Image: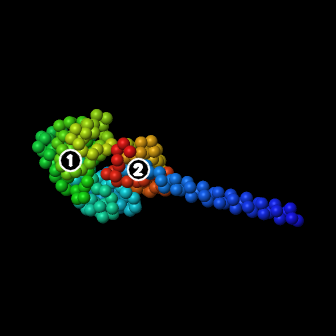
Amino acid sequence: MKVVIIKKAVIIVIVIALVLTICFFNRYTQTLSDQVEPKKIAIIIDDFGNNGEGTDDMLKIKEHLTVAVMPNSPYSINDAERAHKKGFEVIVHLPMEPIRGKKSWLPPDSITSDLSLEEVLKRTRAAFDQIPYAVGFNNHMGSKISTNRDMMYVILKEAKKRDFFVLDSRTVVGSVIDEVSQDIGINHYDRDMFIDSKSEYEVYKQVLKLAEISEEKGYAIGIGHVGPAGGKITARGIEDALPKLKKRNIELVYVSQIKQGS
């Protein structure tokens, strides 16, 4: 009888020891996780300004997103104000002529290759003036202009005067945006990948690919869209990925919060 009682006591002691060990380990790993600097992802949502499909869905996401608003569009000011009110970062989505594609695809007063440098400056200033709360800009299309050194100097010098940063959407391999940015001393970033897709699950996977990039270099930058290129599907895919990002100690931040080389 005494042997049975002793065995039961030993088992109880072992169970208690295991429980305490697990609790301690969980607390230790949690503390360790809290001490590790989170990797960072910035997601920019292009094509605001037209009240496109998914605009409301994007604005309901309770995370740090950067919203790129197209100037000279029906809802430019309204979308910028709504995004700012919701706590999002606002930038100008500057429309620029592509190598392939029609000029008719661009909104009025876009930056096109047939303009004088004086007119480029005039249109750039008007676009920047038009979007309230803007702290930077990225290019809408623009593969033809982003390879034009003279025009990019004009655009980026004006951006620097306003203390803007520039995000190169990387629509062409030969872009000079980074090079010119370094020459004139303006903060610049590059897109790592586009995240839109035809299904919510594919967008989810794209966001997780961004996570992998951020784990390698400390941060990653992705671009999605409202309207036909993304919209509701992209918004849902982003939201689906948020719990996974949190588990991997990855923080969603504004573009301006990213420190390059970190």
Q: At which x and y percent is residue 134?
A: 25, 55
Quarter occupied by the N terminus: bottom right
The residue depicted at 50 percent of the width and 53 percent of the height is 33
| Label pair 2/1, CB-CB below 8 angstroms | no
Kindly identify which residue carries mark 2: 40
The number of numbered badges drawn on the structure is: 2
Q: Could you tell me which secondary element the residue under label 2 belongs to?
A: strand
Kindly identify which residue carries mark 1: 160
* Label 2, residues with CA under 10 Å away: few <14, some 14-19, many ≥20: many
Question: Hey, which quadrant is residue 82 in on the image?
Answer: bottom left
Question: Hey, which quadrant is residue 104 in on the image?
Answer: top left
Choose between 207 and 32: the one closer to the eye: 32
Choose between 108 and 58: the one closer to the eye: 58
Point out the tag, 2 or 1, that comes first from the N-terminus: 2
Q: Type of residue at label 2?
A: Lys
Q: Could you tell me which secondary element the residue under label 1 belongs to?
A: helix
In the displayed structure, does residue 16 sit left or right of residue 118?
right
**Which residue in the rendered view is the most extreme toward the top?**
174
Give the vertical position of 133 relative to 173 (above or below): below
Quarter occupied by the C terminus: top left
Q: Is residue 145 visible?
A: no
Q: Type of residue at label 1?
A: Lys
- Structural distance between the alpha carbons of marks 2 and 1: 25 Å
Choose between 202 and 15: the one closer to the eye: 15
Q: At which x and y percent is residue 47?
A: 30, 52
* Label 1, residues with CA under 10 Å away: few <14, some 14-19, many ≥20: some
Choose between 35 and 144: the one closer to the eye: 35
Q: Is residue 147 visible?
A: yes
The residue depicted at 47 percent of the width and 51 percent of the height is 36
The residue depicted at 22 percent of the width and 51 percent of the height is 163
